Image: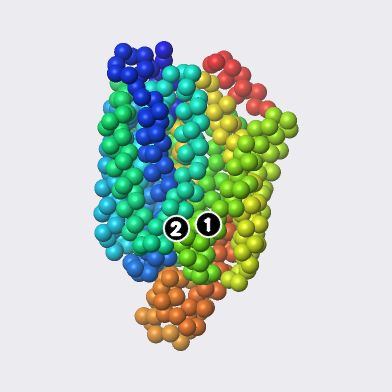
Amino acid sequence: MTVTEPGTGLGAARPDAAASGGPAVRHNLVLLVTCLALATVVAAMASLNVALPDIARETRGSQTQLSWIIDAYSLVFAALLLPAGALGDRFGRRRALLVGLALFGGGSGLAALTTDPTTLIALRGLLGVGAALVMPATLSTITGTFPRAQRARAVSVWAAVAGASAVVGLLASGTLLELWSWRSVFLLNVLLALAALAGTLLFVPESADPDAPRLDVTGALLVMAGLGTLVYSVIEAPTRGWGEPVTLGGIAAGLAVLAGFVAWELRRRHPLLDPRLFRNRRFAAGSLSITCQFFAFFGYIFVIMQYLQLVRGDTALVAAVSVLPMAVTMVPLSRLSPRLTARFGDRGPWVTGLALIAAAMAAIGGLGADSPYWLLAAALLLLGAGSGLAMTPATTAITDALPRSLQNVGSAVNDLSRELGGALGIAVLGSVLSAGYRSNLDVTGLPPQLADAARSSLAAAARIGGPVGEHARTAFVDGMHLTLLTGAGVAALAGVVVALLLRRPDRRADGQAATHH
């Protein structure tokens, strides 16, 4: 029996481990270990947001450096996801898990020892390398070791863990910060990585596809250079100036390199990611929707955790618990969405979900320093409902738009859309927040050293205290308004584009898919 590898976009059909005549595979333990590894790297995308105020106070990092501390992980994760998955396919998924978990755990241990924001940024990038090796290898291992009859259940568990880990990470970090410092978040990473590493050594069998195409090194370098240049220019824009030649030139250079990546991939026999797939309107709509949803979600998390702790004065745990209303509506509507789609078609629920996300982001952006919590809770219920309605049809559109022989590519693009959306959301919305905060903060009459400190971040201004701290909180809220309205605009634009792409069936693409089945 053969299975098609859905983890990375480059796998191929290969023998099922259970039928290969090797040692018996303990499937439940394999599932437990791979899901633990998955939860470890997915939770790290959101969990450190809760600790940002503490990190800012101790490292004295600026608002721009705080953006980098969060986004270095997401950016490297997204840029390396496809090539790292291809390496796992070719040289062994178990090896990829072991190396990735070792890098993730070792980098987390070093991060817990530093007080320098630049070093912390570099170590978060190292964690991103480990995460890029781990995530595709987890799903690849499951699909390669489970019998066909058990595979769907195992993949559904994997998907549930991938979806819930960000919220669990926020809660775990909030709890740890009540007891200890921000370093405990990294030490938890170490413990989880060690547990997953031991489980991989004991229970996970090796699997590889030695006939997989050679890694497209040029394509991988182009996408890393393009994304890196683009995100760097956006994050540094508030410090250097949005209208400065270095900022505009960097953004233009990043976009040009990414265009070069597309041109290169069109010429490849075995591309890292075939741009022609996006001619399929449903595939394009699903990819765009997921990217924009995670753009809004991770940008919102980056902003709201600082608002709750530094503006409202909540503790880390209270801040983490405060965002839970989102899950109250997201989970049931995620389950209801397929039934609504079956009855009304996917365009209505999908576009409605994106519209609700936009409305919720705008509502949260309208909050002030003294707004009652119930206003935030109501907006979060709306945000969860929109996410639940839109996520399922977007994911389904990616996989259903492709023939069975390309399901591996669909899974890879789904993962890439999530990570890329998160990285861009933190970069763009974090940059808008930083620029808004700086432009609205009045430091007239302050000594230059104190003025520079107050401009660097809200946490630094809060340390100064007095009128400066109050003015800084007001400036942060003003910047938050523009930031979340920007996120709302991205979600609304995604809704319009998805509605246009789905205005009629893509008969050409459907016919192509049918010929491959």
Q: Determine the residue positioned at 51% across, 31% down.
A: 156
Name the residue rendered at 31%, 47% in the picture: 191
Q: Pick whichever, 310 or 283, lies toward us.
A: 310
Image quadrant for the C terminus? top right
- Mark carried by residue 321: 1
Which of marks 2 and 1 precedes in the sequence?
2
Name the one closer to the observer, 509 or 315: 315
Front residue of this view, candidates 140 and 34: 34
Q: Is residue 225 left or right of residue 50?
A: left
Residue 378, given in percent of the width and then of the height, sits at 66, 57
- Amino acid type at mark 1: Val
Q: In terms of secondary structure, where does tag 1 sit?
A: helix
Find residue 174 and name its label: 2
Residue at 57% x, 20% y: name it. Answer: 513
x%, y% of residue 224?
A: 37, 43
Residue type at tag 2: Gly
The reply to whether the C-beta atoms of the residues labelled 1 and 2 are less than 8 Å apart is yes
Neighbour tally class for label 2: few under 14, some 14-19, many 20 plus, Cα within 10 Å: many
Image x and y of residue 76, in percent: 37, 46
